[in-house]
Amino acid sequence: MSKKLIALLMAAMMVLSVAAACGKTDAPANDNTNTTPDNSSNTTTTTPSDTTTTPTDTTEPEGKVYKTYLASEVASLNFIDNVDSNAATPAGYAMSQLWKMYPSETGTNYIWMDDLAVGDPIQVDDYNWQIKLREGATWQNGDPINADTWMFTFQQRLNPKMMPRMASFLYNNVVTIVNGENYLMQGTDGYPATVAWEEVGLKKVDDYTIQITTTDTGYTPTDIKKHFDGRDNTPVHQGMWEECLSADGLTTSYGSDLEHFVGCGPYFFESWEYDSIQIYTKNPDHWNADKYNFDRVEVRIVPEMNARVELFEKGDIFSLSPDANTIETYLDDPRMTTYGSLSVYHIDINCKNPTNPLSGSVNYRKAIYHSIDRVMAADSIFGHMLPVGTYVNDQAGLLSESGLTYRESEYGQAVTAMVDSWGPSGYNPEMALEYLDKAIAECGVTADQLPIKVKYCIDEGDISWKALGEYMMEEWPVIFDGKMELEIIPYAGMSATDFKKTGDDKWDLSPNDWSRGMSRTYPHTCFLYYTSGYSGRPNNYLSDEFDAQYNYCEEIKLGDYDTLLKETQKLEEIYLDTVIHVPICQAINYELFVDQIELPVKTYIPGFGWGAIFGDIAE
């Protein structure tokens, strides 16, 4: 790499952020998490001009105050549609679920705590489970929460008019709900023309009992609890929802600001200064109030790393995840902790750009795949990450019965070995040029159409991805012999998905980092977002072979785990052969907490996290 590029990278990394779009999520880790800066919403989202804010109180609050941050603002409190991982923070504080994960007494694991449900799910027969609800539970405005609340919530989550983007996590997460998908997708290609709500496997038994019907057998009470875990599995307030619903029933302003939101959690969402600070105060009347120790929680929105470091050093935030530029300062700090991640940073490829004559070519995608020096990028740009040319994350399979991760298995290792045979983590400039030449010949590109200009669209705040783009801008003319060049297309004030909606001709490459907590149990599920069945998919390349193999893995996921690993290998090989997207590096988390925070666990627990929401402040 040239001295000029190194200088550019060093300058960029002055404000580099490893996870600028995802931010800190201090609520318990969700089992259906996808972290991404790349999503739009069906809601009318809050903007600084239309948010009702309360000025920050400059006086020192009384009691125990927990101070944390998010790297980006939460777009909406409509949790059944907002796919951004940072929504887990307000959902954790201001909302309740059927059950929540809670740290064990030893601090080495988690247990399930009753929340809006009471007791374990009750198995009626092989396919039916009943859930007893907490009597007397209310919204923070005093309205009751009962079986009708949940039936209304379920019906909105599967609303065929709105098509909420978190819908699949209700009908097919850990378990599959009878006719859930058919109800959501009714009237579309491949689905029944009409499906009555009464045909869906979600029923009210009495005022405080609901029942679900699954398509498969062999589930446990814990599986049912896991199915309903996560920020999207919180109830919807019917009165507020109906008040916020548009006349055509297609959109809602529910959760766009605090005036259009009703909470039911252990904390009141007290004030929301958009792009500045969220303030939560303890709800002393919550049924689990004794489990929460903070009197007040302050969540600052801090996009820039330098600002986070300053706040951390002053004690104005209580944790810090260093980036590539700041991590060297803290590597030897005794407070530093390191733990794995579900995220594989990658680049989505547009296969439908009418202005790019190579768009849609597998050889073109393979050329891009082999052109990126992942070893350099993981260390110098993203900061002590792990270079990978594979996609299935390091934690996939960690919570399986055997505890064997896919990457550690013979099947995952075989794919890693194949990738490394091409070059370090798949990097091979010679192969990149060969594939580009094949693509040019395949697509009939003439000399006067060269060089191909590839549009790399990035949010202006994504400094790490910008640095990678600058590397590609300098290296590609050399690697591709002047036949293909990169053009950085910056945008601001919108999500990547919204930018892409401005036209297929506007972009070719888009950085991303989707992940899924369920892959810790079933490794293949990390690919869900790249199948045709996921309505909120971030890519526009679909493969019938890939879909079929994913669906086959779904069919056997409750069977022999070794077989599932073997079939996941085939799924990953299809992914690599068709280059559904380009992996760059496996994210590794580095985090420090101030000494005054007493965390409820002794070490980071995959699937649960640090449990900071249940922490305490040292006296």
Image: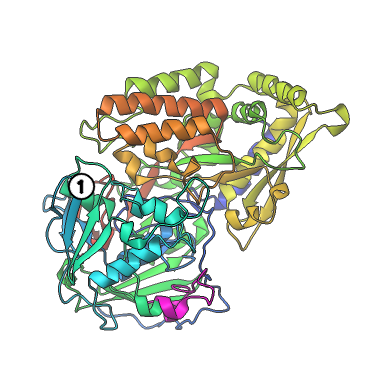
Q: Quarter of the image containing the N terminus?
A: top right
Report whether 29 appears left or right of 287.
right
Q: Judging from the image, what secondary structure is the residue with disc 1 in?
A: loop
Residue ID at (34%, 29%):
406
Residue ID at (24%, 52%):
213
The residue to which callout 1 is attached is: 127
The magenta region covers 241-261
Residue 332 visible here: yes
Q: Is residue 367 above or below residue 169?
A: above
Is 485 in front, or is 10?
Answer: 485
Report whether 80 appears left or right of 29.
right
Image coordinates for residue 277, horizontal then vertical, percent: 44, 72
Residue 313 visible here: no
Image coordinates for residue 315, horizontal then vertical, percent: 36, 65
Residue ID at (86%, 27%):
447
Residue extending farthest to the top is 421
Q: Is residue 402 magenta?
A: no
Q: Quarter of the image containing the C terminus?
A: bottom left
Q: Is residue 400 above or below residue 97?
A: above
- The answer to which quarter of the image holds residue 565 is top left
Q: Is residue 254 magenta?
A: yes
- The answer to which quarter of the image holds residue 239 is bottom left
**How many labels were placed on the picture?**
1
Image coordinates for residue 353, horizontal then vertical, percent: 71, 43
Image coordinates for residue 435, horizontal then vertical, percent: 67, 22
Amino acid found under the numbered disc labelled 1 = Tyr
Report whether 592 appears left or right of 578.
left
